[in-house]
Image (cartoon, rainbow, N blue to C red):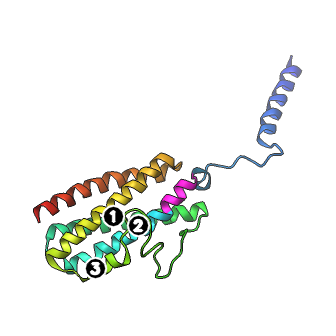
Amino acid sequence: MRKIFFSGAVLTASLLLGACSSTDSPAPAPSARASHNAADATFAQQMIPHHQQALEMAKMVPSRSSNPKVVDLASRIDRAQDPEIRQMQGWLSAWGVAATSHSMPGGHEMSGDHSMTGMMSDADMKSLDAAKGPEFDRAWLEMMIKHHQGAVEMAKTELAQGADAGAKALAQRIIDAQQAEIAEMQGLLKQG
């Protein structure tokens, strides 16, 4: 009996070890590389410059706005989106994916007249840069609403097509935060 038991134990151990060391490549350990798909990479690659433009717009506000509520909103946008940019840059690095998919002069991906949802053209940005006071506030709110609507659309695409749990969680946070900010901005426009 003892010999049969020993043989059974050796056979079981051999089968378990054999399953772990087959001639196929070893199963990868869970990693950032294995958790993402092309939609996740596209989401990060596009949302980074999208957020960067929102930060550029937010940084215009303190020197041009006449409305403390607009100044406060711009400050909140700056505080929220800057860490999200760093988070997405970290994902792209961990995934071994280039940070940009369309490099353009000036440091901004797809800057100028382009088709990324919600992005302002160079002409829009120059016009905004030249405005002051209530004229600036109205233009800024209208542009930021469009910008946020674009980000929400991009985030919804990530939720529908992405695979990475972290990227999908960020997409949901973007949807929740930016839809609330859109409602706030629409309210500010009505007051103005």
Q: Earlier in the sequence, mark 2 or mark 3?
A: 2
Depth check: give the residue in front, 7 or 121: 121
Q: What is the number of the mark on residue 50? A: 2
Q: Could you tell me residue 37's position as x and y percent?
A: 58, 52
Residue type indicated by callout 2: His
Above or below residue 99? Residue 19 is above
Seen at 37% across and 55% down, the residue is: 152
Residue type indicated by callout 3: Ser
| Residue 178 figure quarter | bottom left
User: How busy is the neighbourhood of tag 2: few (under 14 within 10 Å), some, or many (20 plus)?
Assistant: many
Residue 71 visible: no
Q: What span is in magenta? A: 36-44
Q: Which residue is mark 1?
A: 147
Q: Could you tell me residue 39's position as x and y percent?
A: 53, 54
Above or below residue 136? Residue 90 is above
Q: CA distance from mark 1 to mark 3?
A: 16 Å
Seen at 16% across and 62% down, the residue is: 188
What quarter of the picture does the N terminus occupy? Answer: top right
Q: What is the number of the mark on residue 127? A: 3
Q: Are marks 1 and 2 in contact (CB under 8 Å)?
A: yes
Q: What is the number of the mark on residue 124? A: none
Q: Earlier in the sequence, mark 1 or mark 2?
A: 2
Q: Could you tell me residue 29's position as x and y percent?
A: 65, 49
Q: Could you tell me residue 162's position as x and y percent?
A: 51, 50
Front of the two marks 2 and 3: 3
Residue 53 visible: yes
Residue type indicated by callout 1: His
- SS at mark 1 in the image: helix
